[in-house]
Image (cartoon, rainbow, N blue to C red):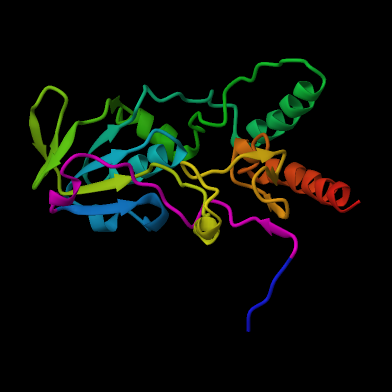
Amino acid sequence: MNTAAKRLVSATGTWKNPFIPEFKDQRKFQGLQVHSAHYVNETPFRNKKVLIVGGGNSGAQILAEVSKVAQTTWVTLQEPKFLPDNVDGRYLFEFATRQYKARLEGKKIEPVGSLGDVVMVGTVKEARERQVLKAVRPFDAFFEEGVIWQNNNKEAFGAVIWCTGFKSSLDHLKGLNIMENGRTQTNGTHSKKVDGLWLVGYGNWTGYASATLIGVGRTARSTVKEIQDFLN
């Protein structure tokens, strides 16, 4: 049975849509490739030579585990940034709230770190003691047994773990032909192209820090107000 709705709130988030960047000849690689979304533990990588791609918390934490049982190389776009040992993720979420309120007042406050910095949990601290938190810049391409670095040197790897994040899960909106590069234009969370459509929880383009637990609550509340105003 077909059903129709005059108003739709799309809140499917990002976690069901793992992102893996494209590299030249990636399909030729014969080793194991796993996204962090499907990583369980270090066991499948024991005694392998493993490439870990991605500079966030998942990259650092998976590196910390896998490096205990395998030879690892950590690849990041830029040199990874680490929070001070006494700053945890809770601080970042609390700061995000203060920063949001400051922006509304036209003010600017600076954090100790950012939401993209690595939180120094116990396993990552231990990895630092073993001196494995060292990253290199990306390679250029794959070959059957590994990757080709920017200096054209080839290096063999048995596995690649992609810690490269997620994209908005918006395949259900493809039929509307409003998506460009994984997003659509919004005014607040209200779609600029479809009057009856709101989008919640996909990232900063749907509200400051809206892909985080603390941020989505704010944008969800503002969405209710937007819909009320629209209906009135």
Q: Residue furthest right?
A: 232
In the rendering, at what x and y percent does residue 230 appear?
Answer: 84, 49
In the rendering, at what x and y percent does residue 78 appear?
Answer: 36, 23
Q: Residue at x 67, y 35 (%)?
A: 93
Would you say residue 14 sits in the magenta stretch? yes
Q: Residue at x 56, y 56 (%)?
A: 176
Q: Is residue 78 left or right of residue 115?
A: left
Q: Residue at x 39, y 41 (%)?
A: 164
In the rendering, at what x and y percent does residue 159 appear?
Answer: 20, 49
In the figure, 216 relative to 176: above or below?
Answer: above
Determine if residue 69 is in view.
Answer: no
Task: Please state the extent of the stretch shown in magenta in the rendering.
Answer: 6-30
Quadrant in the picture for residue 39: bottom left
Would you say residue 150 sits in the magenta stretch? no
Q: Is residue 148 left or right of residue 107?
A: left
In the rendering, at what x and y percent does residue 163 appear?
Answer: 37, 43
In the figure, 139 relative to 4: above or below?
Answer: above
Determine if residue 187 is in view.
Answer: yes
Q: Residue at x 39, y 35 (%)?
A: 126
In the figure, 80 relative to 229: above or below?
Answer: above
Between residue 64 and residue 206, name the one nearer to us: 206
Quadrant in the picture for residue 25: top left
